[in-house]
Image (cartoon, rainbow, N blue to C red):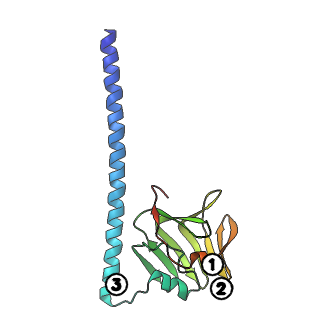
């Protein structure tokens, strides 16, 4: 009788483990389908705008035009949307990723980064973090001065100056599992 109860208990534990693993797999699959769906949707918008004849600049060119360093975002973006009337910028990336810059700073990006693009400033940023002992959300990025030795100011709880030349060139991002 005891052996039968032990066997039933181990079967229940085994089926619980299997259902837990299945649930994890379904969650991962759902996340991948959602990412793929949003990627396809954003590419379709980009193609539609191209067909309508809306000229799109590269993101680095747009950032330069607004007096920001062109390498603030990784090279491997999918596309971006910019509403000039509202100054709203949305950058779409294929996955959560991070970039290590030449000044040893590290910035992590969500699959979609939203911000208000102003002259010399990215404000109200959503979807960007930087490492300051721990990962902290970046709320604003600003450039002060016109000289080549000027600084980029990251506001992530505290205001931190970084050399602007570290962000002169868009770099390849490394995929990370979570933002």
Which numbered disc flags the more N-terminal residue, 3 or 1? 3
Quarter of the view holding residue 23: top left
Q: Name the residue under label 3.
A: 49
- Asked whether disc 2 touches disc 1, contact meaning CB atoms under 8 Å apart, the reply is yes
Q: Element type at marker 1?
A: helix
> Is the residue marked by circle 1 packed among few (<14), some (14-19), or many (20+) residues within 10 Å?
many
Secondary structure of the residue carrying numbered label 3: helix
Residue 166 place in picture, x, y as percent: 60, 75
Residue 89 is tagged as none
Using the image, determine if residue 29 lies above or below residue 141: above
Q: Earlier in the sequence, mark 2 or mark 3?
A: 3
Q: Mark 2 points at which residue?
A: 148
Taking depth in this image into account, of 118 and 166 the one nearest to the observer is 166
- Which of the pair 94/89 is nearer the observer? 94
Mark 3 neighbour class, 10 Å CA radius: few under 14, some 14 to 19, many 20 or more: few
Numbered label tally: 3
* Residue appearing at x 47%, y 81% in the figure: 59
Q: Residue farthest to the top?
A: 1
Quarter of image, res 107: bottom right
Viewer-closest of 103 and 124: 103
Q: Mark 1 points at which residue?
A: 164
Give percent across and percent down for residue 162.
Answer: 66, 72
Distance (Cα) linking label 2 and label 1 = 8 Å
The residue under the point 39% across, 73% down is: 78
């Amino acid at each position: 009788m005891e052996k039968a109860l032990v066997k039933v208990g181990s079967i229940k534990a085994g089926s619980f483990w299997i259902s837990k693993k299945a649930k994890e797999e379904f969650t991962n699959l759902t996340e991948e389908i959602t990412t793929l769906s949003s990627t396809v949707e954003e590419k379709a918008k980009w193609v539609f705008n191209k067909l309508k004849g809306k000229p799109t600049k590269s993101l680095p060119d747009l950032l330069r035009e607004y007096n920001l360093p062109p390498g603030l975002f990784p090279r491997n973006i999918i596309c971006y949307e910019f509403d000039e009337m509202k100054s709203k910028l949305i950058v779409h990336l294929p996955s959560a990723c991070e970039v290590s810059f030449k000044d040893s700073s590290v910035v992590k990006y969500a699959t979609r980064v939203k911000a208000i693009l102003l002259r010399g400033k990215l404000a109200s940023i959503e979807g960007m973090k930087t490492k300051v002992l721990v990962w902290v959300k970046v709320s604003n990025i600003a450039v002060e001065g016109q000289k080549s030795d000027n600084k980029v100011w990251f506001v992530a709880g505290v205001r931190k100056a970084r050399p602007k030349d570290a962000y002169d060139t868009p770099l390849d991002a490394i995929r990370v599992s979570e933002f």
